Image: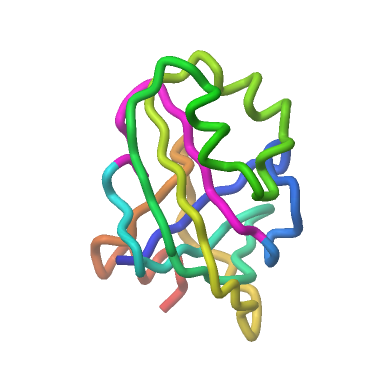
Amino acid sequence: MEHIAIQNKKYTFSPINQLDIFCRCQLRKDPPYDRVSVGDLVYPLMDGNIICVVDVSYVISFEFSNIKDVIKLCKGTSLYGGNVFWEDMKDRRYATVIRISNNRTLPKPIIPRARSYGHGWITLDTKEKKSNWLNL
């Protein structure tokens, strides 16, 4: 499966083409919760551009009561020291931690025709979504 991960600049602590982790903390079990698998491809989107693609190498979705449980899973990554992120996520209840590898810069940036209205994660589960987000 392929996905679009919409990145918030406020919570992106390394250059987009050097990302090593995605972490989503939410109030509900919204995507990517239980919708991502090892081997999936993710296209990070920031500032309206997709400039790279990454492989999912590890994923876990779970309910948490203490943000420290999520922080432990992010130790050693670019997100680990992002105190503003953890402070903003502490009252959420569901987390998906996705370790990524094989970050590949695309030959040219993709500027998707599609737009997201509040969603931070898009699963490209139909031909139409894939075409609109990746301009195929």
Residue under the point 43% across and 64% down: 57
Figure check: 80 above or below 125: above
Left or right of 25: which side holds 102? right
Residue under the point 46% across and 44% down: 97
Figure check: 102 above or below 94: below
Q: Residue furthest left?
A: 126
Residue range (magenta) = 19-33
User: 101 or 52, which lies in front?
Assistant: 101
Residue under the point 52% across and 69% down: 54
User: 65 or 107, which lies in front?
Assistant: 65
Residue 119: x %, y % from top left: 44, 39
Residue 107: x %, y % from top left: 64, 85
Figure check: 75 above or below 71: below
Residue under the point 60% across and 47% down: 7
Residue 82: x %, y % from top left: 72, 35
Residue 96: x %, y % from top left: 41, 40
> If the image is split into quadrants, where does the C terminus sit?
bottom left
How many discs mark residues in the rendered view? Answer: 0
Left or right of 31: which side holds 80? right
Toward which corner of the image does residue 19 lie, by quadrant?
A: bottom right
> If the image is split into quadrants, where does the N terminus sit?
bottom left
Q: From the image, give the main secondary structure of the stretch colored magenta.
A: loop
